[in-house]
Image (spheres, helix red, strand yellow):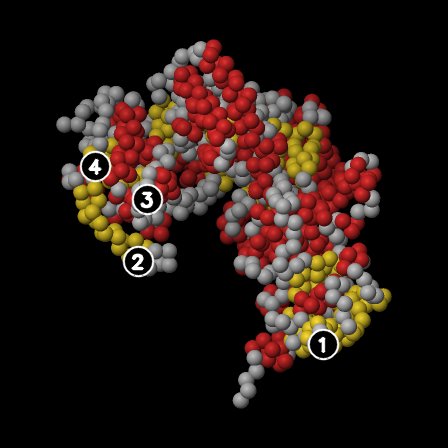
């Protein structure tokens, strides 16, 4: 299914939406930015005026229809305006990750063939100048912050204010031409080009039309009842599709206010000051916030600690009760109200989340404890599943039906199909991208003739909640010998949610059962050892301690218990495990630099250990090569204990292993 | 884009043409003007010890002037003389065309000379914002009563000062620590706050006493950038003491070298680097 906006409604492109907002929401705030310690605001009318001045200035400097314009910098209202100013000229905005080094930037700018660049400051100007010889199309650089740029050659460089001044002067000359261009544009025109971060190979430019963005934004905004009264903090990279949808798409469609923090370092303070009603953050940020709270609570007085513990336990108990479908009694409700007054309310205020009506997280698996923590104190945190190629939204969770394991129901307008054989999730929606820029081959590999797009992720529809559940990258999903589904990353994530477990590697593809390597978290377990008077000399000694083994065993058996209940993955219960005597390390090639396990390399390097696990031995002697930080190599030798684990009756209908 | 940018130095035949080219391309060349401070034959004694012996040099408007020398050469004493903390027994100091009498440091501060210290001298219990605000003290005109009442004119005045302080905070990129007590900040940031406090006085002449001492490479680079930007953006004349030679040679316009209280060299970094007396003082002289 694809969709198209009706041009007659006059809301089928961003410039037209801006004009409509300037008419209908003239005096409502469209954006805020903290500058010089004070929040500065712009109304929709002012934004329209500023954007038009810039658009005219760009036209005067020679930006032509069909060209592309790079936008580089942290979230600033002026940079958001420049996107629409480019569109008014029929040009395509290309936001670029501002922390990219000059080389990476050169590839994107060259690939997109940008002729203009609007950048934040001297840092970005310097990067562009350092590669400008290899950017034959680049004609003009426009910067927002003039600091340090006074002595640069201004033949092909202008300040943002200067361009706006030129634009205001050119109103009589070019005004009607711009109006005509705005009126002539339609929803099928390219709206924006976003480069995928490119973890595999070179980044690809994803071309999205106004129809893609506006239809998806409208559907998802209606799903969550976003209105002009909402506000959001724009702090994630502008080059990321999510920011474009939240801070541009949904903001223009619903007319809400986008607030830009003062700097990346002040994000938390700015969050508290603004108190947004709509908030997105990856799980890592939610985790960091919770850690800060936990640490500060440890330092609090005994009374406060008691209050916090008592009421947090109550909140958790109540949310579990709700999950089971029971309604808490009036006593419990009264206690919750008291807790809201004494603990939850102040806590939300400290986190800057008092006003959040809709909160989302996505990008990686979120721990159930973490998820429940935020939900239990009354924050409407939900999950969504999306990609750049879909204009973000594929599925999202409804307010009243939130399961930490699932990622929601399809956003209105999205169709989902799960491949029978591979389990890979496919989708088709009005948001499906037009093409990869200058890369028809990759386009054809990703999107088929009927408009179905492969996500690369394997998943299934959970029969209990009717929502989509994502298991793993489709490439990593395999099968056990009895044919049951094997999703290692899903199980590993479940294990890693225990604070004692830093890394886990699960084996089982083509085998009769799953077995695991565990890395303990030296901080968490070390802390526990100190409190329990267990002396240890280092990682190796602690990892081999019988009580640590017992603790890890309890953790894995708890995981097994929850897996047994799973309709698809109860075959993935772990039957045997060992705790490695060495931490998996990127220097040894066992992890990527972003700390993802390199399954194949670990499998080869530790082949003897895997054989011992499957061979039924109760211990194994191993010599493991390590690389020290200075590049020298050494060996760790020792005998590792292997333990059997309790498994639980399987809920799935797959045949039992013989 | 590269094809459009002329190589100015090659195109221009004369200085005048060069200047025109620069203006055409929107380049405002750095302005180094008249002598702003002239130090004439200064001698400073502490009892029998001669800290500074008959030293003369000048500082021009808009330049970065460095004072270097080995330990105990009299660099900090020299800065304290300029600052009015020490009163030399002999010699004269001319500032902005007038001979300076015997003034107290706060009177000199009012004349437009601000400084930072080798050992950080901030109010450690106060926030970054409040510390920088104290730099505005010499510019506050309302008396204590008004300020205690904090209404009407005093409030308006405070808002004006706060605005300037916020611009400095933005300039030094310390927004995130605006409300943090400076005692909790790492060393490099404290140095930056101290620079902010000196800047808050909107000085004509800024004295920096070893601004990079004890910093790591990255902090040094940041500090260099801030010093150059202060000089470039505000046109502030800067005199700095530093013993990290590489830093000085990179950022200073002119360098004066002291050794055992006497001046042994004065000139551009290149001239000073080639000066035999300077090389001897830094590397030692072979006595064979």
In the picture of the structure, the residue carrying the numbered disc 3 is A598
Decide: is B163 above or below B109: above
Label annotation for residue B53: 1
Label annotation for residue A643: 4
- In the orientation shown, which residue stands out farthest toward the bottom? B288
Residue at point 44%, 46% (across, down):
A202
The chain that hosts pointer 1 is: B
The chain that hosts pointer 2 is: A
Q: In this view, does B89 lie to the left or right of B217?
A: right
Q: Are marks 2 and 3 on the same chain?
A: yes
Label annotation for residue A70: none
Percent across and percent down for residue B124 are: 62, 48
Label annotation for residue A633: 2
Q: How crowded is mark 1: few (under 14 residues within 10 Å), some or many (20 or more)?
A: some
What is the distance, in whole Å, between disc 1 and disc 3 at their CAs?
69 Å
Frontmost of labels 1 and 3 is 1
Residue in front for this viewpoint, A536 or A427: A536
Residue at point 69%, 48% (across, down):
B132
Residue in front for this viewpoint, A477 or B238: B238
The chain that hosts pointer 3 is: A
Frontmost of labels 2 and 3 is 2
């Amino acid at each position: 299914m694809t969709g198209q906006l009706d041009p007659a409604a006059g809301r089928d492109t961003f410039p037209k939406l801006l004009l409509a907002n300037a008419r209908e929401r003239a005096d409502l705030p469209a954006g805020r930015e903290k500058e010089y310690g004070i929040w500065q605001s712009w109304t929709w009318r002012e934004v329209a005026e500023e954007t038009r001045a810039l658009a005219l200035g760009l036209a005067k400097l020679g930006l032509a229809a069909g060209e592309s314009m790079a936008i580089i910098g942290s979230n600033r209202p002026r940079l958001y305006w420049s996107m629409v100013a480019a569109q008014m000229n029929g040009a395509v905005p290309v936001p670029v990750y501002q922390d990219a080094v000059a080389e990476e930037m050169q590839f994107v700018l060259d690939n997109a063939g940008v002729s203009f660049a609007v950048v934040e400051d001297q840092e970005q100007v310097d990067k562009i100048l350092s590669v400008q010889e290899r950017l034959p199309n680049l004609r003009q650089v426009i910067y927002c912050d003039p600091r340090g740029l006074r002595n640069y050659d201004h033949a092909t460089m202008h300040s943002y204010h200067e361009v706006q001044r030129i634009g205001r002067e050119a109103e009589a000359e070019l005004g009607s031409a711009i109006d005509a261009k705005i009126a002539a544009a339609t929803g099928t025109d390219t709206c924006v080009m976003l480069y995928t971060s490119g973890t595999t190979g070179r980044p690809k430019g994803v071309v999205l039309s106004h129809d893609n963005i506006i239809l998806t934004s409208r559907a998802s905004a209606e799903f969550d009842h976003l209105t002009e009264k909402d506000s959001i903090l724009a702090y994630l990279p502008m080059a990321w599709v999510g920011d474009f949808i939240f801070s541009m798409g949904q903001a223009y469609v619903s007319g809400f206010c986008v607030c830009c923090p003062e700097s990346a370092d002040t994000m938390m303070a700015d969050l508290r000051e603004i108190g947004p009603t709509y908030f997105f953050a990856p799980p890592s940020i939610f985790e960091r916030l919770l850690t800060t709270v936990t640490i500060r609570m440890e330092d609090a007085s005994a009374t406060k600690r008691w209050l916090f513990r008592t009421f947090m336990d109550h909140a958790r108990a109540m949310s579990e009760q709700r999950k089971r479908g029971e309604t808490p009694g009036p006593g419990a409700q009264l206690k919750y109200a008291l807790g809201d007054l004494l603990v939850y309310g102040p806590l939300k205020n400290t986190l800057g989340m008092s006003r959040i009506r809709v909160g989302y997280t996505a990008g990686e698996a979120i721990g159930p404890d973490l998820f429940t923590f935020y939900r239990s104190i009354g924050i409407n945190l939900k999950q969504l599943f999306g990609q750049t190629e879909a204009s973000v939204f594929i599925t999202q969770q409804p307010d009243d039906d939130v399961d930490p394991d699932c990622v929601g129901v399809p956003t209105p307008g999205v169709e989902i199909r799960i491949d029978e054989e591979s389990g890979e999730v496919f989708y088709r929606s009005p948001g499906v991208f037009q093409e990869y820029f200058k890369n028809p081959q990759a386009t054809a590999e990703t999107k088929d003739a009927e408009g179905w797009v492969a996500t690369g992720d394997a998943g299934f529809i959970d029969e209990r909640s009717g929502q989509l559940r994502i298991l793993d990258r489709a490439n990593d999903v395999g099968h056990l010998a009895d044919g049951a589904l094997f999703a290692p990353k899903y199980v590993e994530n479940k294990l890693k949610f225990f604070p004692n477990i830093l890394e886990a590697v699960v084996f089982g593809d083509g085998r009769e059962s799953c077995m695991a390597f565990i890395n303990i978290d030296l901080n968490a377990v070390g802390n526990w050892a100190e409190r329990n008077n267990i002396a240890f000399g280092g990682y190796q000694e602690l990892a081999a301690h019988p009580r640590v083994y017992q603790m890890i065993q309890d953790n894995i058996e708890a995981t097994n218990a929850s897996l047994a209940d799973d309709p698809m993955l109860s075959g993935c219960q772990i039957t045997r495990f060992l705790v490695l005597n060495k931490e998996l390390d990127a220097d040894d090639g066992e992890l990527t630099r972003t700390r993802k396990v390199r399954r194949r390399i670990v499998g080869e390097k530790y082949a003897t250990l895997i054989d011992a696990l499957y061979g039924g031995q109760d211990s194994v002697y191993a010599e493991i090569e390590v690389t020290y930080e200075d590049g020298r190599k050494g060996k760790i030798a020792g005998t590792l204990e292997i333990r059997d684990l309790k498994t639980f009756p399987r809920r799935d209908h797959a045949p039992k292993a013989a | 884009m590269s094809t459009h940018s002329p190589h100015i130095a090659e195109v221009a035949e004369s200085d005048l043409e060069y200047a025109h080219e620069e203006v055409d391309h929107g380049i405002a060349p750095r302005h180094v003007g008249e002598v702003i401070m002239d130090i004439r034959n200064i001698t400073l004694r502490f009892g029998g010890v001669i800290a500074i012996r008959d030293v003369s040099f000048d500082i021009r408007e808009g330049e970065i002037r460095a004072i270097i020398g080995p330990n105990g050469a009299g660099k900090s004493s020299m800065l304290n003389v300029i600052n009015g903390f020490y009163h030399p027994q002999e010699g004269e100091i001319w500032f902005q065309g007038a001979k300076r009498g015997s003034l107290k440091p706060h009177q000199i501060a009012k004349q437009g000379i601000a400084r930072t210290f080798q050992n950080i001298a901030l109010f450690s219990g106060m926030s970054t914002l409040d510390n920088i605000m104290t730099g505005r003290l010499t510019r506050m005109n309302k008396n204590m009563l008004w300020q205690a009442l904090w209404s009407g004119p005093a409030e308006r005045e405070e808002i004006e000062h706060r605005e300037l302080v916020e611009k400095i905070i933005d300039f030094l990129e310390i927004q995130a620590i605006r409300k943090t007590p400076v005692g909790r900040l790492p060393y490099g940031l404290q140095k930056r706050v101290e620079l902010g406090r000196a800047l808050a006085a909107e000085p004509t002449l800024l004295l920096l006493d070893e601004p990079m001492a004890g910093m790591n490479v990255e902090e040094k680079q940041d500090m260099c950038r801030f010093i150059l930007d202060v000089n470039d953006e505000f046109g502030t004349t800067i005199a700095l003491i530093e013993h990290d030679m590489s830093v000085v040679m990179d950022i200073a316009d002119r360098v004066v070298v002291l050794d055992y209280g006497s001046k042994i060299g004065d000139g551009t970094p290149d001239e000073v680097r080639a000066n035999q007396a300077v090389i001897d003082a830094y590397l030692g002289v072979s006595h064979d």
